[in-house]
Image (cartoon, helix red, strand yellow):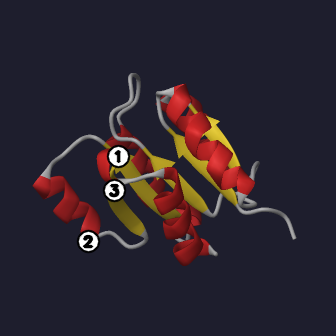
Amino acid sequence: MAPKRIFFIEDEREIIDLYKDVLEGRGYKVVGFSDGSEAMIEINAIADGKSPAPQAIVLDLLLPDVSGLAILGELRSKPIFDGVQIIVLTNYVSDSLQESIKQMDKVEYLSKVDTTPVSLLENLNAKIG
């Protein structure tokens, strides 16, 4: 069986690498995107049927070029991503945003300061196996 794919959209390459080491050590395949436009190209390729969808997407909201919220909106507008677990992992703190995200199906909001690579791994194991 092929490993489950996870997209990790985060502008700090060191954070991608840290989480990637832990997740890939447990059998996941992590594809890192260090900017939003790079991720949007792949998202559109998936929507056009040119690439397979991942099982989960870890998304930072504070990106230098394309807002994580814009990416989240794009993902929610494309039916192919309806079954994909999205984990917003960010330092951006907003009660109203957290509340909005809680209302979305298959989207979870996690704070970077409260999340370790191991706790994210456990979260993913529970959500996508």
Say whether marks 2 and 1 touch (CB < 8 Å). Answer: no
- On screen, residue 95 versus residue 101, left or right, reads left
> Residue under circle 3?
110
SS state under label 3: strand
Front position in the image: 104 or 50: 104
Say whether marks 3 and 2 touch (CB < 8 Å). Answer: no
The tally of labels here is 3
Residue 76 at x, y = what percent? Answer: 42, 59
- On screen, residue 30 versus residue 69, left or right, reads right
> Residue under circle 1?
112
Between the C-alphas of marks 1 and 3, the distance is: 6 Å
Q: Nearer the viewer, mark 2 or mark 1?
A: 1
Q: Amino acid at mark 3?
A: Leu
> Residue under circle 2?
103
Q: Amino acid at mark 2?
A: Gln
Give the vertical position of 54 relative to 83 (above or below): above
Residue 129 at x, y = what percent? Answer: 64, 75
Say whether marks 1 and 3 touch (CB < 8 Å). Answer: yes
Between the C-alphas of marks 3 and 2, the distance is: 14 Å
Query: How many other residues sit within 10 Å of disc 3, few (<14), some (14-19) or many (≥20)?
Result: many
